[in-house]
Image (cartoon, rainbow, N blue to C red):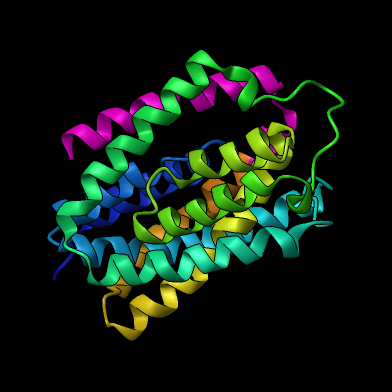
């Protein structure tokens, strides 16, 4: 496919905005996936190509959170086991399943997350001073992390919300640390998914790298905001993004 200057500017702008949104909450792919499809990429190729930007953005953002001392790594091996198993299964499902499955899965997830944040906000915002739990102490978190890995590799869009439910809701990390761990977790299953998509020759590298260039910048600025923002502000940003994600899932 051919790109003109307008297409490049569109991807650069949306990449930057998506990088910020993905770092602070999730759902940036609700912008980038439709854009890639509007530019002519089939849904499966757009889904695969989007992972190039996600990979580089999460790598950049996780390093930035770590530099600020906000990336807890004490239980990361236990977190990555169910996440990786789910990631492999989700990537294989995305690579072979009919693309018609993507929209209902995305819509159902977004609506569910919106209702949880609205009706039970304490799920995503633990009380100050709450001591995080380990995966071994909360068997339900193993299932939630597995679902996060599967969903993230399968459709990607909105996986940040699912991960926050697992990390803040089940393991009780505060929102800043949940966002930091969310990026590292996303980096993990995105790496798995990207390998599978590359092997299946489903990645369009030019639009993927154009998006990635500004998604990294957006992630950098998103981390700075997350470090300074109040937990209440992050909670409302998360809620607004889930509503936007629900709307995007209905119309794209």
The image position of residue 124, as x and y in percent, is 62, 28
Residue extent of the magenta highlight: 223-252
Left or right of 30 on screen, residue 63? right
In this rendering, the count of numbered labels is: 0
The image position of residue 3, as x and y in percent, is 18, 64
Residue projecting furthest to the top: 119
| Quadrant showing the N terminus | bottom left
Is residue 6 among the parts visible in the rendering? no
Residue projecting furthest to the bottom: 199
Nearest the viewer among 170 and 230 is 170
Classify residue 206 by image quadrant.
bottom left
The image position of residue 158, as x and y in percent, is 41, 42
**Residue shown at the point (52%, 46%) measured from the top left:** 218
**Residue shown at the point (73%, 49%) measured from the top left:** 65
| Quadrant showing the C terminus | top left
Is residue 199 among the parts visible in the rendering? yes
Inspect the magenta stretch and tell me whether residue 225 lies in it. yes
Left or right of 250 on screen, residue 27? right
The correct choice, above or below, for 116 with respect to 189 in the image is above
Left or right of 96 on screen, residue 85? right
The image position of residue 178, as x and y in percent, is 67, 41
**Residue shown at the point (81%, 47%) measured from the top left:** 68
Nearest the viewer among 132 and 249 is 132
The correct choice, above or below, for 85 with respect to 215 in the image is below
Q: Main secondary structure of the magenta part?
A: helix
Left or right of 70 on screen, residue 223? left
Residue projecting furthest to the front: 139
Inspect the magenta stretch and tell me whether residue 15 lies in it. no
The correct choice, above or below, for 91 with respect to 169 in the image is below
């Amino acid at each position: 496919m051919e790109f003109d200057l307008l297409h490049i500017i569109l991807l650069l702008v949306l990449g930057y905005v998506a990088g910020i949104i993905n770092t602070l909450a999730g759902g940036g792919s609700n912008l980038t996936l439709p854009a890639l499809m509007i530019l002519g990429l089939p849904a499966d190729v757009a889904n695969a190509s989007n992972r190039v930007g996600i990979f580089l953005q999460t790598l950049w953002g996780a390093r930035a959170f770590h530099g600020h001392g906000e990336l807890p790594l004490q239980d990361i091996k236990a977190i990555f086991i169910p996440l990786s198993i789910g990631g492999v299964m989700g990537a294989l499902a995305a690579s072979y399943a009919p693309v018609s499955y993507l929209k209902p899965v995305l819509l159902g997830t977004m609506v569910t997350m919106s209702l949880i944040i609205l009706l039970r906000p304490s799920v995503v915002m633990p009380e100050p001073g709450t001591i995080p739990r380990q995966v071994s102490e909360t068997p339900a978190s193993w299932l939630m992390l597995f679902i996060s890995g599967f969903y993230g590799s399968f459709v990607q869009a909105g996986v940040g919300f699912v991960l926050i439910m697992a990390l803040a809701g089940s393991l009780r990390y505060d929102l800043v640390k949940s966002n930091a761990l969310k990026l590292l977790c996303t980096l993990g299953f995105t790496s798995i998914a990207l390998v599978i998509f590359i092997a299946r020759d489903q990645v369009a590298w030019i639009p993927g790298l154009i998006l990635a260039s500004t998604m990294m910048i957006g992630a950098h600025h998103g981390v700075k905001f997350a470090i300074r923002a109040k937990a209440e502000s992050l909670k409302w940003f998360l809620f607004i993004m889930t509503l936007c994600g629900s709307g995007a899932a209905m119309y794209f």
